[in-house]
């Protein structure tokens, strides 16, 4: 008799979800689904608000990556003003963005995923968390906490507060950087490099123990989408869209991000609140693609900074074409931390970083604006339309986790097939199914722009949809 | 010359002039009384009731901003009962419209927010009404968000008493009362508005703001209203 296994809630991710694993009559995994069970509706309730409130409103979508929403939104608003922001403002926005990339990647790697990697997928769940890590590997836990603090500190020194700053505004930023804050940030960078390098060494030394996970953690050919610079380099704040295939061949390049809807479609499934974006030329669901650190490194020709380029060279050795295993999202995150640290150093060492001219003043001059940035989890798109008075009439947000939805679903099918047998759920198999989701570092609060509780449930269902086994975590 | 009289406020014996309000005398003597609808330079409205005080021998609380002092009056400005009433008033104000500080232009410079913090309003015990009023962004320089209005009428008094334009007024009654421009026309279409901005400076919350201001960027200074008011009165 066929059955379904449900994991509800999924733990150590940002947001609320459950996983169902469907078994056939022989007790083998036939299908699996990642259900996002929260709904928020930002696109609807922002209608009628003045457009210049959007950066602050949409930043509240997320407590982990508010800066990404703030920046994508501010960029969309720059378009509505029809201005080019002062160069110093762009420089400071980039530093802010790098601060967030560092803190968010540090959170994902050290706090959420390192317990799986260092303590083992089958370790006791009562100890398989950051506090367990602090007991068994205190140095690594300390490194993670420090690195995240540093990213948050950059945000605070620039923007006034660590979570939900309102500093990026339409036309630039609201205040310039002080020399004191710049110096304090620069002083801390060397320790950041040391930590990032230690983390890379640690990850590389652990790879061999996870060969099976690498093979089946969402390891399949897909396309990849990300921004790149005009020269094809790694870019997180601006640039144009690039799509590559599983062989790392560029299939579309320098796509204007404001034409995203010509290339990306959004499908809806009745069993999840999270939409299913797909690459239009390949249709749905064939147009599956991935975004985020793995996609960015697969897409970029180079990082453009020496230490990160060195790390990228080693990363490339993992595969002949594109690196396809989602397990390596972790590795890609570490390379990006190095890149972000180098970027902060480079941007702040330019004397223009202290330029007090950081804001362009204008009223609404266009009725449609699109802002695209690479959030830590991938390409983030904010698209607004306003009326003559500057009030929002329509908004569309496509969030990184959304882009990865098809790939996350396919990933759990692959992992469940490899690790789940029969109708009995073991702790290790359950954790591996969750861990494949964790690779993507999904932010479900962001992706559904939603409200709700957090965590994961796994259910085992039979062919008639009856629950035959269930594991729940809160 | 006004008649001098003596009264007691919070057990302090105080000399005052007969035409003064309890609030004026209290402030002159550095006795704090919370206010919201009161603004120096404008007439008293007594509408928010936050400045309620107890007067011995009077069976109900009185608004200190509109109650004149009298000989031998014994006033208490703070008591557990007054504090609970003031908190209740603030909670009702917060529940009536959409006062969401997170993305408000006036966050950090808002009298409602300051009062809620000062008076210890940590929760609202009434169901929120969540009204959905349209934002009026038709004016070239200013924006009116009725969702953040507390109906203090400071804008209407600044406009009528100091600027002399009387663009702002109140429409409707009770919980449905609403600040309007002219005869409930779009602000941008008002034929009386001089675009002086006094209403914006007088507003205690984020209901009236300069356009384009981001979160927390609307800083106000309404001190000039009392000076303008005295100058107007000198001329009369």
Image (cartoon, coloured by chain):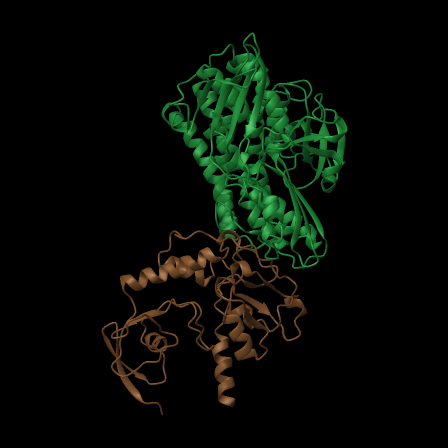
Chain colours: A green, B brown
| Residue A100 vs residue A340, the one in the foreground | A100
Q: Nearer the viewer, residue A448 or A94?
A: A448
Q: Which quadrant of the rendered structure holds the C terminus of chain A?
A: top left
A306 vs B159: above or below: above
A4 is higher (above) or lower (below) than B162: above
* Residue B14 quadrant: bottom left
Q: Residue furthest bottom?
A: B1
Kindly indicate the quadrant of the structure image that contains residue A134.
Answer: top left
In the displayed structure, A400 sits above or below A458; it is below
Q: Is residue A227 visible?
A: yes
**Tally of numbered tags:** 0
Q: Which residue: 49% across, 86% down?
A: B233
Residue B217 in view:
no
Describe residue A232's horizontal placement relative to residue A40 as left or right: right
Q: Look at 62% across and 47% down and name the residue there.
A: A73
| Residue B151 image point, x, y percent | 49, 66
The quarter of the image holding the N terminus of chain A is top right
Q: What is the x, y in percent for residue A68?
A: 58, 42
Where is residue A299 shown, x and y percent of the image? 68, 29
Closer-to-camera residue (A382/A23): A23
Going by the image, does B66 lie left or right of A102? left
Give the x, y percent position of residue A418: 56, 12
């Amino acid at each position: 008799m066929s059955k379904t296994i449900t994991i509800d809630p999924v733990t150590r991710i940002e947001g609320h979800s459950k996983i169902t694993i469907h078994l056939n009559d022989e007790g083998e995994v036939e299908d699996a689904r990642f259900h996002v069970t929260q709904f928020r509706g930002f696109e609807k309730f922002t209608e009628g608000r003045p457009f210049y409130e959007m950066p602050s409103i949409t930043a509240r979508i997320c407590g982990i990556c508010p800066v990404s929403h703030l920046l994508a939104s501010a960029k969309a608003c720059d378009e509505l003003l029809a201005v080019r922001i002062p160069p110093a403002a762009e420089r400071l926005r980039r530093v802010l963005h790098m601060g967030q990339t560092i803190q968010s990647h540090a959170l994902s790697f050290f706090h959420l995923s390192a317990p799986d990697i260092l303590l083992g997928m089958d370790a006791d769940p009562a100890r398989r968390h950051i506090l367990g890590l602090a007991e068994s590997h205190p140095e690594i836990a300390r490194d993670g906490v420090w690195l995240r603090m540093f990213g948050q500190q950059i945000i605070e020194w620039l923007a006034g507060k660590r979570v939900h700053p309102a500093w990026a505004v339409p036309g630039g930023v609201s205040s310039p950087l002080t020399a004191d804050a710049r110096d304090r940030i620069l002083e801390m960078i060397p320790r950041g490099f040391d930590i990032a390098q230690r983390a890379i060494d640690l990850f590389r030394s652990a790879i061999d123990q996870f060969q099976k996970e690498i093979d089946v953690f969402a390891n399949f050919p897909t396309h990849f989408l990300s921004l790149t610079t005009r020269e094809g380099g790694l870019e997180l704040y601006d640039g144009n869209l690039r799509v590559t295939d599983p062989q790392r061949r560029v299939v579309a390049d320098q796509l204007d991000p404001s034409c995203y809807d010509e290339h990306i479609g959004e499908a809806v499934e009745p069993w999840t609140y999270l939409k299913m974006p797909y690459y239009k030329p390949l249709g749905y669901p064939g147009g599956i693609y991935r975004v985020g650190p793995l996609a960015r490194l697969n897409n970029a020709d180079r990082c453009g900074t020496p230490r990160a380029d060195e790390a990228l060279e080693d990363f490339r050795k993992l595969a002949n074409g594109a690196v396809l295993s989602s397990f390596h999202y972790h590795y890609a995150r570490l390379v990006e931390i190095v890149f972000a640290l180098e970027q902060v150093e480079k941007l702040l060492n330019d004397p223009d970083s202290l330029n007090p001219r950081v804001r362009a003043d204008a009223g609404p001059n266009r009725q449609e604006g699109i802002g695209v940035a690479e959030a830590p989890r991938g390409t983030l798109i904010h698209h607004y339309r306003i009326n003559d008075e500057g009030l929002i009439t329509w908004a569309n947000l496509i969030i990184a986790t959304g882009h990865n939805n098809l790939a996350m679903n396919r990933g759990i099918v692959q992992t469940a097939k490899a690790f789940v047998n029969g109708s009995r759920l073991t702790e290790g198999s359950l954790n591996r199914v969750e861990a494949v989701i964790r690779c993507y570092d999904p932010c479900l609060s962001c992706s559904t722009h939603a409200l709700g509780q957090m965590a994961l449930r796994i259910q085992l269902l039979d062919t008639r949809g009856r629950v035959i086994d269930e594991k729940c975590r809160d | 010359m006004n008649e001098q009289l003596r009264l007691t406020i919070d057990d302090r014996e105080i000399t005052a002039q007969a035409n003064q309000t309890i609030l004026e005398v209290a402030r002159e003597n550095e006795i704090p009384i919370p206010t919201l609808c009161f603004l120096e330079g404008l007439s008293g409205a007594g509408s928010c009731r936050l400045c309620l005080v107890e007067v011995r021998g009077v069976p109900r609380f009185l608004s200190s901003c509109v109650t004149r002092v009298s000989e031998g009056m014994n006033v208490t400005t703070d008591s557990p009962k007054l504090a609970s009433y003031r908190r209740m008033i603030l909670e009702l104000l917060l529940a009536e419209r959409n006062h969401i500080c997170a993305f408000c232009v006036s966050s950090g410079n808002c009298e409602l927010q300051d009062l809620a913090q000062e008076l210890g309003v940590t929760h609202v015990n009434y169901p929120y009404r969540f009204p959905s009023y349209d934002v009026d962004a038709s004016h070239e320089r200013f924006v009116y968000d009725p969702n953040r209005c507390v109906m203090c009428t400071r804008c209407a008094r600044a406009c009528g008493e100091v600027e002399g334009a009387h663009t702002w007024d109140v429409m409707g009654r009770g919980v449905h009362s609403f600040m309007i421009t002219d005869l409930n026309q779009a602000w941008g279409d008002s034929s009386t508005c001089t675009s002086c901005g006094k209403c914006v400076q007088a507003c205690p919350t984020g209901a009236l703001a300069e356009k384009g201001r981001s979160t927390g960027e609307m800083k106000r200074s309404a001190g000039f209203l009392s000076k303008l008011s005295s100058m107007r009165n000198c001329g009369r």
